Amino acid sequence: MSKSSEWIDAVGRAIREATVALPADVERALREALTSEPSELGRLHLETLLENARVAREEGLPICQDTGTPVFFVRAGAESPWLADIEAALVEATRSATAAIPLRPSAIHPLTDRNVGNVGRGVPVIDWEIVPGREVEITYVAKGGGSENATGLLFVQPGGGAAEIARAVLAHVARVAPRACPPIVVGVGIGGTADRALVLAKRALTRRLDIHHADPAIAALERDLLEAVNGLGIGPAGLGGAATALAVHVEFAFRHPASLPVGVALQCWADRRAAVRIDASGAAEAVL
């Protein structure tokens, strides 16, 4: 088997895993939310989500009929000898997985609505980050349409600090969370330029729910925002309750003194993701 075929198979398995099985940390968070949810209707909905996840896993079926836009976040070691071949493997893995799982064909021309399956101009979405080393880590995220429509780009008054950022993010989440299939995961990107803030927000969604940012001030903001979001009372499915969000993750970049962009990206309760690592020899393995 060629290295390219090995990668296609490994990434295809990751796509299947993300499509039919909740990550362990997500299922654990849903169960924890169930034990503390005061709303009877909210508990019923969480029980239904967990049962849905069980059936999907056991039957090998997609967790949701919206199997999402395929998005790959690639952390590529600058010294890896395999960089030139990665993109083609990701495209072919997406094409093969669409037929094999199957995935819903969700890539259409923006003007004509012509459907091309899940492979076309700009799809799958591939976000590259070049880092030191020789390994390549590929994280697959399925981005459903409902949660994608809840994405927001905010511009906060420079100098307002964490409190002003938190107020802006909370106001946005309060407006859009009910239509993003809560309980949600909230990704926040702070700083950089406008486009960079949105990328950072989506990268934040690749982090495991139980891991906070290494920067203590950012980690504190994550905890404060999670408490505030769950204090909104939106609850599971937007029907009221305490479990509006399972986690809030924040990433940041330095910014221009006159500009403070904040990107907000939501992921629905089915926080579908899986990862593959390609080492310097070209061998691929799943990343838990």
Image (cartoon, rainbow, N blue to C red):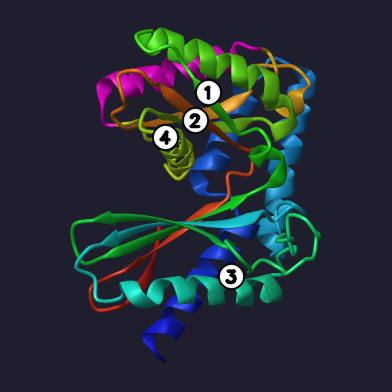
> Is residue 227 left or right of 211 when viewed as pictured?
right
Give the distance between the C-alpha atoms of the residues marked 1 and 4, in whole angstroms.
Answer: 26 Å
Residues at discs 2 and 1 in contact (Cβ within 8 Å): yes
Of callouts 2 and 1, the N-terminal one: 1
Q: Which residue is mark 2?
A: 263
Query: Residue 23 appears at what percent x and percent y?
Result: 53, 49
Mark 4: which amino acid?
Answer: Asp
Of callouts 1 and 4, the N-terminal one: 1
- Viewer-side label of 3, 2: 2
Q: Secondary structure at mark 3?
A: helix
Give the distance between the C-alpha atoms of the residues marked 3 and 4, in whole angstroms.
Answer: 28 Å
Quarter location, residue 115: bottom right
Q: Which residue is mark 3?
A: 94
Mark 3: which amino acid?
Answer: Thr
Q: Which residue is mark 4?
A: 210
Residue placed at 73% from the left, 55% from the top? Answer: 110
Of callouts 3 and 2, the N-terminal one: 3
Of callouts 3 and 4, the N-terminal one: 3
Q: Which residue is mark 1?
A: 154
User: Does the segment drawn in magenta span residue 225?
Assistant: yes
- Viewer-side label of 1, 4: 1
Give the distance between the C-alpha atoms of the residues marked 3 and 1, in whole angstroms.
Answer: 32 Å
- Viewer-side label of 3, 1: 1
> For this rendering, which residue is in front, 188 or 156?
156
Prevailing secondary structure class for the magenta stretch in the rendered image: helix
Q: Tell me if residue 236 comes above or below residue 38 in the rendering.
A: below
Give the distance between the C-alpha atoms of the residues marked 2 and 1, in whole angstroms.
Answer: 6 Å
Q: Secondary structure at mark 2?
A: strand
Residues at discs 3 and 4 in contact (Cβ within 8 Å): no
Mark 1: which amino acid?
Answer: Leu
Residues drawn in magenta: 214-232
> For this rendering, which residue is in front, 162 or 270?
162
